[in-house]
Amino acid sequence: MSSNQPVMISSRLYYTAMMLFWVCYLSLLALVVTYAPQGGLELAGLALFADSGLVETALAAMTNIGLSQLAQSVVLGLLGGFSLASAGLILFAVLFCVFGREREQREARSLAEGAVVCTAAASVLISAISFAGGQAGALLVLQFSALGGLVLTLMSLSQSPIVPDNSGDDAVSDLDQVISDHAANHAAFSAQLASFAKGGGR
């Protein structure tokens, strides 16, 4: 085992824990935006997301603007969709970063960039509504917290070393070794035949 391997393992564990945290955070944020305005979610006798305090200010801002109930539902659906899409992209980025080879590790950064774009779109949307409606509340803070965390995650991920994939080189070297051994055996056999032919011809 090389001296760099323990460092790479600890680095992957760090990125895994960090990105899984944001997956959970964004998923919960999407659930809050979806179910809190509806009075919560009943699951196994538990009342989840029943308190609408986190989205109350955003709903008040949309009411001040003059958005209808349908329009408010569409806006909340977009916010939840952006958060859910961002969580999905980060989850795939975790899988590619931890279990992927060199190519997948590079694609993990692109997935993280897509998550940042989705979260930024949700942040712009809730910012426009909050400022236009004169109400800046908890949802705006939560959304920008997610955006800042994902940006820092992307910056950290961009600086992480990519583990090179040497399996292809090993396969090529093994094939070269087999060909070389076969050629050496064939040359020795040909030399023996030539020796016998010369001996028989005398």
Image (cartoon, rainbow, N blue to C red):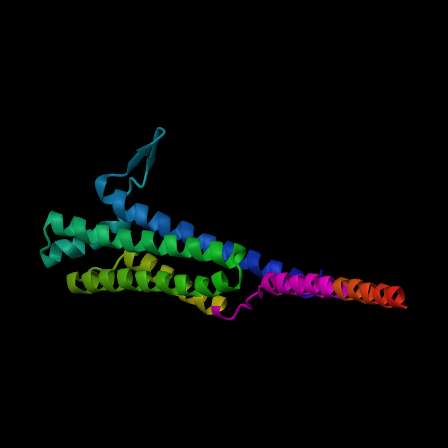
Across and down, in percent, residue 180 comes to: 71, 66
Across and down, in percent, residue 88 comes to: 37, 52
Instruction: Report the magenta residues as a range.
Output: 158-184
**Foreground residue, 109 or 52?**
109
Instruction: Give the quarter of the image for residue 31.
Output: top left
In the rendered image, residue 188 lying in the magenta stretch gets the answer no
Name the main secondary structure of what is drawn in magenta: helix
Across and down, in percent, residue 24 comes to: 41, 49
In the rendered image, residue 162 lying in the magenta stretch gets the answer yes
Which residue is found at the position 39% from the left and 52% from the top? 25
Q: What is the quadrant of the N terminus in the image?
A: bottom right
Q: Residue furthest front?
A: 202
Which residue is found at the position 40% from the left and 65% from the top? 110
Q: Residue furthest top?
A: 45
Task: Determine whether, in the image, residue 174 is placed left or right of residue 85.
Answer: right
The answer to whether any part of residue 52 appears in the image is: no
Which residue is found at the position 88% from the left and 64% from the top? 200
Which residue is found at the position 53% from the left and 68% from the top? 160
Give the number of marks.
0
